[in-house]
Image: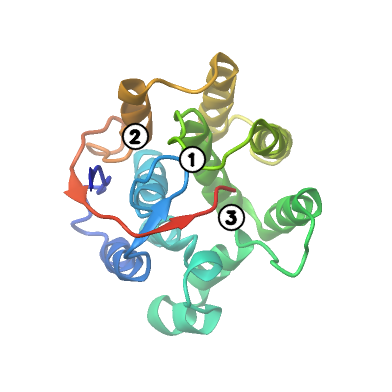
Amino acid sequence: MGVGVCTPRGVVGLPKTRAALEYARILHRGQVRKVDGAPFLVHPREVAGILHGGGAPDHLIAAGALHDVIEKTPATAFDLRKRFGSGIASLVLAVSEDERIAGYAERKAALRDQVAAAGEEALMLFAADKISKARELRLKPLRGAGITKSDRRRRLAHYRRSLTLLREQLPGSPLVEQFADELSELSQGPSADSRAAAAVVRGCEPRGRTGRSSVALASGDGARHRTT
C-alpha cells in the first residue's frame, strides 16, 4: 500500500537530527498507524519538523524524531544515552509514559506531571507531539480500525488538559498556540480523506525556520500501532 511519509528537510548542519531520523526509521520500520494505515514514522518525523520550524536546536529536534522509540520499539534509555547522550535520552524519557500505570486517565495524568517537572524543552517537545496528534485525530479512520467515539473523547480530554498545562508552563509560546488552533479545528469532526492527508503533512518539512512546509512521499506498511 503506497502511503505518504513526511521527511524533514534542511537537516544539513543538524547532525544529531540526521542521525536520529535514521535511527527512528530503522526502529519504526514495519509499524503503521491504526487510524489510517500510514507508516508510524509519519508521526515522529512530523514532530521533528514542527520543532525545526519553531526554531528548536539540533538536540531538541533529534529528541522529537526519537520521542516514541522507548514506548513503541525495543530501544531503551541506555541505548539512547549511548548513541545520543544523556540530554536527548532525558527528553525522550520525559515524554514517555509509564506503562505500569494501567488506567488511561491515570497514566496520562502522570505523564503530564512528568513533563511539567522536566523543564521548558520537554514541554516544547510535548507541545509538538500534541500538535501532530491533534491533526491525527482529525483523520477519517479506516473502516475496521476499531477507533470508537469513547476513544476519541478520552483523547480529547487528555489533549485539553495538556493545553491547560502548556499554557501555564509556556505562556506565549507559538507551539502552544498552534496546538490550541489544532484543537479548535477538532470540533469540526473527522476530516475527509483528501483533507486528512494535508493535515498530516502540514508543517512536516519546514523550508527554513518559518514553519512553512513541503511534502515528500515514500512507501511502507506493517503492524498497526495504537493511538494515544
**Residue beneath disc 3:** 122
Q: CA distance from mark 1 to mark 2?
A: 29 Å
Q: Residue flagged by tag 1: what amino acid is it?
A: Gly
The residue shown at (21%, 37%) is: 215
Colouring rule applied to residues: rainbow
Q: CA distance from mark 2 to mark 3?
A: 20 Å
Give the image location of residue 228, x and y in percent: 59, 48
User: For residue 213, what is the image quadrant?
Assistant: top left
Nearest to the eye among marks 1 and 2: give it: 1
Give the image location of residue 27, x and y in percent: 37, 70
Callout 3 secondary element: helix
Instruction: Tell me how many marks there are.
Output: 3
**Residue beneath disc 2:** 203
Mark number, residue 144: 1
Give the image location of residue 177, x and y in percent: 56, 27
Specify which label sits upstream in the sequence, 2 or 3: 3
- Say if mark 2 contacts mark 3, CB within 8 Å: no
The residue shown at (71%, 55%) is: 111
